Image: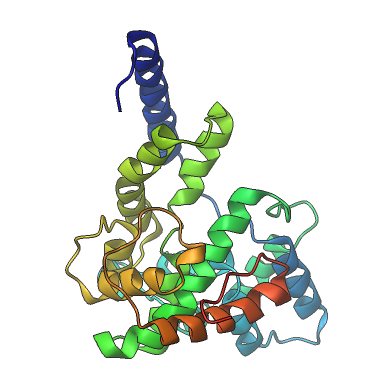
Amino acid sequence: VSLDPPEGRAHSVRFREFARRLQERLRRNYLMRPVHADTATLLHELLKKKPPLDLSALVPIAALDQYLTLDLLILANSLSVDRENSVGTVPEALERIGPRAAAVLIDRLSSTDFPTLPAKDPAPRAVRRASLAAAVAAGRFAERYGITRERGYTLGLLHCIGYADLFEIVREMNLPAGPFRGALLETYRPAVGRSRAEIWGLPRDFEAVLSDDGTDPSASAAVVRIARGAVTGCAIGSLPVEHTDELESDELAREVNMLFDYLGLETVAVGRE
């Protein structure tokens, strides 16, 4: 694509400003991420029940919200002396932090003075759709790659979490949709994913997924790539060359659509319908 000199200079200025804002964000202490509004409601209802907190009731709630899953992993892994002992699933995180710490966390996340993600905001909705679709597919494919179903689901759920920082800057700068914005997102996403995985203390296989540029040879990155390609109508960013059986993709799309219907998200087309 050819650019005239003024347009080229304008893109250069925007590129440098985007890089400056991103560097600034990555230097900040990273606090817990707000959860989706429907998640906050479920957490608030859970806290109303007679103590002690039923940790098992948190697992299905976290399975529908990548940010609650992330917050639980951040808290659990903050107790690890090194990343080799980090946990990568919600049941493992809850076992490590226990009911009292979990209750404090969800009390804060569901508090009326703690922000939630706007239900109608297109960016969080897009990330949630992509996260859930990849999670369902990765959970199904995980054992083929020597990964447990629970861990595969979580890898898929968190795979595009790095986009949150990038979308915030896109919003701040009011960058219009188009090739330039798309190139910015795909250029910086692997670096953001790698940086965040380290800051959050996530296991190495999660870092491989979050920083994957399509060439990472690990089993975790491979299963998420094939999962993203299985439900293409939800994927954010460039899609892998790996292809899934069409019948299996249709089955996954139907399963994903049941979750989307429940959460009020836009459904995906099913090829055979």
Q: Is residue 37 left or right of residue 132?
A: right
Which residue does the image show at 38% across and 76% down from the upper left? 87
Mark count: 0
Please identify the residue farthest to the top as the structure is shown: 6
Residue 188: image location, x then y, percent: 34, 42
The residue lying toward the viewer, choosing from 97 and 130, is 130
The residue lying toward the viewer, choosing from 71 and 128, is 128
Question: Is residue 187 visible to the viewer in this orientation of the structure?
Answer: yes
Question: Is residue 33 visible to the viewer in this orientation of the structure?
Answer: no
Instruction: Name the quadrant of the C terminus.
Output: bottom right
Which residue does the image show at 68% across and 66% down from the upper left? 265
Residue 36: image location, x then y, percent: 67, 61
Residue 167: image location, x then y, percent: 52, 43
Which residue does the image show at 38% across and 52% down from the upper left? 196
The residue lying toward the viewer, choosing from 255 and 118, is 255
Q: Quadrant of residue 4?
A: top left
Residue 43: image location, x then y, percent: 73, 73
Please identify the residue farthest to the front as the structure is shown: 272
Q: Quadrant of residue 33?
A: bottom right
Which residue does the image show at 37% across and 37% down from the upper left? 184
Q: Is residue 199 left or right of residue 56?
A: left
Location of residue 185 with respect to 176 vertically, above or below: below
Instruction: Name the quadrant of the N terminus.
Output: top left
